[in-house]
Image (cartoon, grey):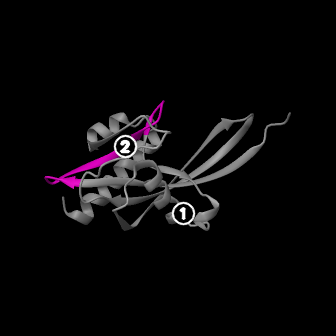
């Protein structure tokens, strides 16, 4: 059987809060790695990347009260093998601020979560492109909050 290439699009948030003038990032633990809340576009999202990110945030964390920070939109692209075919995936990330460390209600696809300072979050993230995303988000946050 011939391998097929498929395209997938997902959307999510780099989620942060500021506590005692220190930025903390929310990471979710999958069985094999830590990441940010994200997921696939579904029919009810009306092809809106932001609607998908909002829905995934609520589904994966239970967080409903957050501010979307305008001006931040990064796309991570990568390829992986799935069901005997190559998948080319684009994940669109936006920035969301919680005004306190919200109580988290994890989805079934995650095993743990944590609010981490930059260095710890960087170490926990397994993939280099996600680490770069974290650093880009951190620079953006420092600029807009003057910290």
Around disc 1, counting alpha carbons within 10 Å, would you say few (fewer than 14), some (14 to 19), or many (20 or more)?
many
Q: Is residue 87 left or right of residue 1?
A: left
Q: Which residue is mark 2?
A: 27
Closest to the observer, 83 or 111: 111
> In the rendered view of the protein, which quadrant contains the N terminus?
top right
Name the spot of residue 123 as percent of width and height, x first. Answer: 33, 34
Around disc 2, counting alpha carbons within 10 Å, would you say few (fewer than 14), some (14 to 19), or many (20 or more)?
many
Quarter residue 87 falls in: top right
Q: Is residue 40 left or right of residue 22?
A: right
Element marked by disc 2: strand
Quarter residue 83 falls in: top right
Residue at horizontal 65 percent and vertical 46 percent from the top: 88
Closest to the observer, 97 or 3: 97
Residue at horizontal 67 percent and vertical 35 percent from the top: 81
- Asked if the magenta segment contains residue 36, the reply would be no
| Labelled disc at residue 12 | none
> Which span is picked out in magenta?
18-34
Residue at horizontal 72 percent and vertical 47 percent from the top: 6
């Amino acid at each position: 059987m011939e391998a097929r290439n498929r395209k997938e699009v997902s959307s999510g948030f780099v989620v942060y809060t500021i506590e005692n003038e220190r930025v903390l990032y929310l990471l979710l633990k999958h069985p094999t790695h830590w990441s940010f809340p994200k997921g696939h576009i579904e029919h009810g999202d009306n092809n809106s990347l932001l609607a998908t990110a909002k829905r995934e945030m609520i589904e994966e964390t239970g967080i409903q009260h957050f501010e979307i920070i305008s001006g931040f939109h990064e796309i991570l692209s990568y390829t992986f093998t799935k069901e005997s075919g190559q998948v080319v995936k684009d994940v669109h990330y936006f920035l969301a601020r919680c005004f306190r460390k919200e109580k988290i209600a994890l989805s079934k696809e995650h095993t743990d979560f944590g609010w981490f300072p930059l260095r710890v979050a960087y170490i926990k993230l397994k993939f280099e492109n996600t680490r770069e995303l974290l650093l880009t988000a951190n620079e953006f946050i420092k600029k807009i909050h003057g910290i």
